[in-house]
Every structure is written in C-alpha cells, then in structure tokens.
Image (tube, helix red, strand yellow):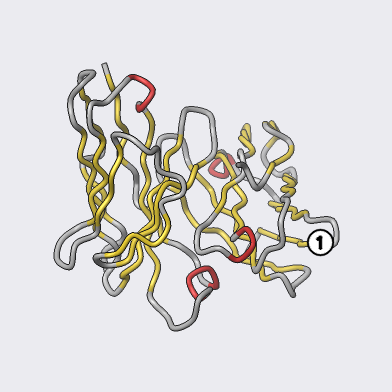
Amino acid sequence: SQQGEEDPQALSIQEGENATMNCSYKTSINNLQWYRQNSGRGLVHLILIRSNEREKHSGRLRVTLDTSKKSSSLLITASRAADTASYFCATDANGFQKLVFGTGTRLLVSP
Amino acid sequence: NAGVMQNPRHLVRRRGQEARLRCSPMKGHSHVYWYRQLPEEGLKFMVYLQKENIIDESGMPKERFSAEFPKEGPSILRIQQVVRGDSAAYFCASSPSRQGAKYLLNTEAFFGQGTRLTVV
C-alpha cells in the first residue's frame, strides 16, 4: 500500500518563485527522504531528515518534518527552470528495511 | 566510484518472452532493492536482496517474477512470459552494509538510471 501521499500532484510556477510540496505518511518512521526524478531518468537523492529532526537545509532546499501530523514539506527557494522534475518523498515505514515512496509532485518551473 | 549500473536501459519484449534486467550495485554495497514505476506513478517496492539471500520479497508478484543476487555478478530481475501490464520502468537501488537491523535506512539509497521495459 502507498505510504506517502504528496500534495499537490502538480505545481506550475515561474522562475524565481518558491515551490512548496507536502508529503503525508501513515505509519511511524525512522526517517524521511526526498528524491527528485527528471523525466525518463533515475532518482536523485536530495535530503534525509530523521524522525528526531524538525528542519533541515541543503542549499536552496528546506525540509520540515512534523511527526505528530505525520507530514513533511519540501521547499525549493528561488526556483530555476532546471528544477523542473517530479519530487517524491520516501519513508522507511515502521522501520522496515525498504523505502516506501509517495505518488510524487510534478513541478514545472517556467522561465 | 561508478554509481549503480543498470542494463539494458531500454528493453522491448513481445508478449510471452522473458525479460532479464541487471543491476550492479555501487562498489562496496551488498544490499540491492528493486522498484517498479508505472507511468505517472511513484515507485513501488518489489524485493530487497543481500548477496545470495532474498530478505524481503513482499512486493513481488507471486508468479512470473523472480530475483537473485549471486555471490558474484549483478543482481538479476527476471520476468517470465511478459504481458503488456509489465511495461514499466524498473529501478534498482543499493546501499552499504552496516551492523544492526535498521542500518540501511539511516543513509541514502543510490538509484540506477532504470530499465524501461516495453512489452509489445
């Protein structure tokens, strides 16, 4: 069964704007990860946030985690056309040794 | 250090044929995961293997699908008697081995570029 659900399913913005994507999950986790997938390509790991962390930054990326609400958000600041991709959250649902992915948010950044 | 290597990148099979997908993990990684991605969907876990062991195959269809990770050589995902519904992108990921039951997911998993299977 699907662990994560991303929201929105699709997001279209202009270059320079910020993009926020949300992920909700169902079970307890040890950590949550965000991945990017360019069209027709593999997944690129963006950031991992552990269950005892609330916020993490990496360059233009900011991830928050609220374990009480079982949700996470990914913020991309000052977006660029090259950020156009699908973004997935993934969790280790109940600590099992596999990643369970959400359905993804398709981000389109227009020049 | 080469990343996770999958081949072929694209595979076309007729219905009823066999498809064999290969995955070579990153150097030093002994844990391999296979995922399937249908068009416009997220990745669905299929199987988790260590060298010569299947650890978790809860996502594998019960029939026609099998996976192995021999002591030597790449991991193989085999699909027998393919049907059109098997058309998808199949991704492999690897992670390093550590002690402990939950070590794997304290670090990122590295994904290959995927094999896109088309059944005609």
A89 up-or-down from A29: above or below? above
Query: Percent position (x, y) of residue A5?
Result: 69, 42
Q: Which residue is mark 1?
A: A66
Left or right of B26, for residue A39: right
Query: Percent position (x, y) of residue A12?
Result: 69, 31
Query: Crowding at label 1, few (<14), some or many (≥20) Cα neighbours within 10 Å?
Result: some
State which quarter of the image contains the C terminus of chain A: top right
Type of amino acid under label 1: Asp
Looking at this view, name the residue that lies furthest to the bottom: B99
Asked whether B55 or A110 is in front, the reply is B55
Give the residue drawn at x 38%, y 35%.
Answer: B89
Instruction: Tell me the element at label 1.
Output: strand
Query: Percent position (x, y) of residue B97?
Result: 38, 76
Looking at this view, name the residue that lies furthest to the right: A68
Give the residue drawn at x 23%, y 26%.
Answer: B81
State which quarter of the image contains the N terminus of chain A: top right
Could you tell me which chain the residue with mark 1 belongs to? Answer: A
Looking at this view, name the residue that lies furthest to the left: B72
Give the residue drawn at x 68%, y 33%.
Answer: A9
Query: Percent position (x, y) of residue B113?
Result: 34, 46
Left or right of A12, for residue B118: left
B1 up-or-down from A25: above or below? below
Left or right of B5, for residue A66: right
A12 up-or-down from A90: above or below? above
A40 up-or-down from B102: above or below? above
Looking at this view, name the residue that lies furthest to the top: B120
Left or right of A1, for residue A17: right
Give the residue drawn at x 67%, y 31%.
Answer: A10
